[in-house]
Amino acid sequence: MSKSKLIASIILILGLGGLSLYMNKDRFRRESIQITHRLNPARARDGRIPITFILNGYYKLKNIRVVNATTYETNKFVLPVWRLITESNSVPVSTFNYGNNIRGMRPETKGARPETLQAGVTYRLVLETDRKQKAEYDFTVPATQTQ
C-alpha cells in the first residue's frame, strides 16, 4: 500500500468516526430531568391540598428549593419558601410532596418549616442532583386549592 493510499484511508476513517460522533451526539448527553406535579385533593388536611412532584426517573437529590418565580427572575438569591439539602446520603426518589421530608435530606435551617403556598402565585421548584444535574419547574396553586 502506497503512502498516499494509507493517508487517504486514515483521513476516511477519521472522517467517518467524526461523522458518527456528530450523528450520535445526543447519546452522550445526560438525560434532562423532567418534572410534573399533581394535586391530591383526597389527602387534603386543614383546607390544604398536598402537591406531589413527579420526576422522570430516580434521582439522588442534593438540593431542593421552592421560590416565588417572579422574584426569582430578578434575584437568584431570593429566600425560598421551602428548602431541603443533603451533605451526602439522600435516597433516590422519583416523587416527593411539597413540605415533606425526604430520607437523607434536611431543612437548610434547623427547625425551619415550609411556608403555606399562596393561591394564584407562580412558584418555581429548583433542584440539583448528586451528579450536578439541575432542573427548574414552574407551577401555580389554583385559587380554590391551596397548600
Image (cartoon, rainbow, N blue to C red):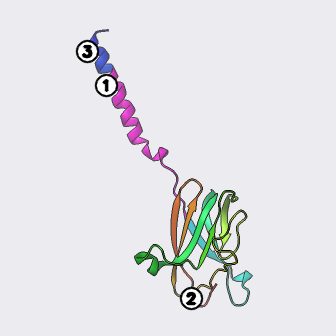
Q: Earlier in the sequence, mark 1 or mark 3?
A: 3
Q: Residue 67 in magenta? A: no
Q: Residue furthest top?
A: 1
Q: Nearer the viewer, residue 112 or 44?
A: 112
Q: Earlier in the sequence, mark 2 or mark 3?
A: 3
> Is residue 116 toward the left or the right of residue 72 in the image?
right
Give x and y (percent) for residue 113. Answer: 67, 80
Q: Main secondary structure of the magenta part?
A: helix
Q: State the separation of the CA atoms marked 2 and 1.
A: 63 Å
Q: Amino acid at mark 2?
A: Ala
- Above or below residue 44? Residue 102 is above
Question: Where are the magenta residues, as a range?
Answer: 10-34
- Above or below residue 31? Residue 41 is below
Q: Provide the secondary structure element on which disc 1 rests.
A: helix
Q: Amino acid at mark 3?
A: Ser
- Above or below residue 88? Residue 126 is below
Please report the residue visible at 40 percent of the width from the left and 36 percent of the height from the top.
20
- Label 2 with label 1: CB-CB less than 8 Å: no
Q: Which residue is mark 1?
A: 11
Q: Amino acid at mark 1?
A: Ile
Q: Residue furthest left?
A: 4
Q: Which residue is mark 2?
A: 119
Q: Provide the secondary structure element on which disc 3 rests.
A: helix
Please report the residue visible at 55 percent of the width from the left and 77 percent of the height from the top.
80
Please report the residue visible at 68 percent of the width from the left and 59 percent of the height from the top.
90
Q: Quadrant of residue 7?
A: top left
How many badges with numbers are in the image?
3
